[in-house]
Amino acid sequence: MDRFVGLYDPDGGAASISVGATKKPSTEGFFIAATLLIQRARLQITMKMPLTKLTQYFVVEKLIYHSVDLSLYMVSAIVEGTEYYIVDNRGAFLKSSKLLELHKALRKVSAEKTVLRHTSPYDEMVGGPDKTHSNALEVPLADNQLS
């Protein structure tokens, strides 16, 4: 008898896959189902919002400028408790090598709190303990009054 594993579909439906036709539990089938579930979860984490839609909100909870690399910045916003990465009209992530450029692009967005967030990938040690919390550093940013 086939076993079916239900997966959450962010588009509103439910997806299912057949993971085997044996009487014993299939390790490979459960691995495949878990992998698909993780991929679906990642899709939800990286939700996108166009800049034109973001400017329609009166106030957003938090505007986050991410320091991704030495000179690469991306932007996300927390709206109604959910974090969205901001994209342009073509659907490409809003990014720049200059923080001031992003400030200018987002000058019409009013936020309760604005921060610069940096997360270091270099805090792991071989054989060290598992991390129980994020190492993200958030620095408050003032309004540059670019209006």
Image (cartoon, rainbow, N blue to C red):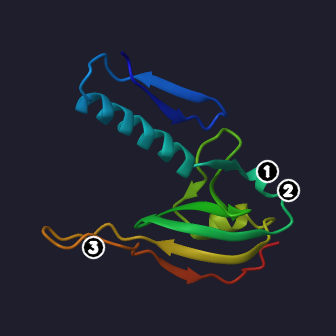
Q: Alpha-carbon distance for marks 3 and 1?
A: 36 Å
From the viewer's side, name the closer residue of 101 and 9.
Answer: 9
> If the image is split into quadrants, where does the N terminus sit?
top left
Which residue carries the number 2 mark?
56
Residue 86, relative to residue 78: is it above or below? above
In the rendered view, does 80 fall on the left or right side of 15? right
Query: Do the CB atoms of the residues marked 2 and 1 lie less than 8 Å apart?
Result: yes
Which residue type does callout 2 highlight? Gln
The residue shown at (60%, 43%) is: 92
> If the image is split into quadrants, where does the C terminus sit?
bottom right
Which residue carries the number 1 mark?
53
Which residue carries the number 3 mark?
123
Which residue type does callout 1 highlight? Lys
Residue 25 position, x and y percent, is 26, 29
From the viewer's side, name the closer residue of 26 and 111.
Answer: 26
Which residue type does callout 3 highlight? Asp
Q: Quadrant of residue 3?
A: top left
The residue shown at (66%, 76%) is: 114
Dot 2: element = loop
The disc placed on residue 125 is none
Q: Counting residues from the N terminus, which is met first, the one under dot 2 or under dot 3?
A: 2
Residue 131 position, x and y percent, is 31, 71
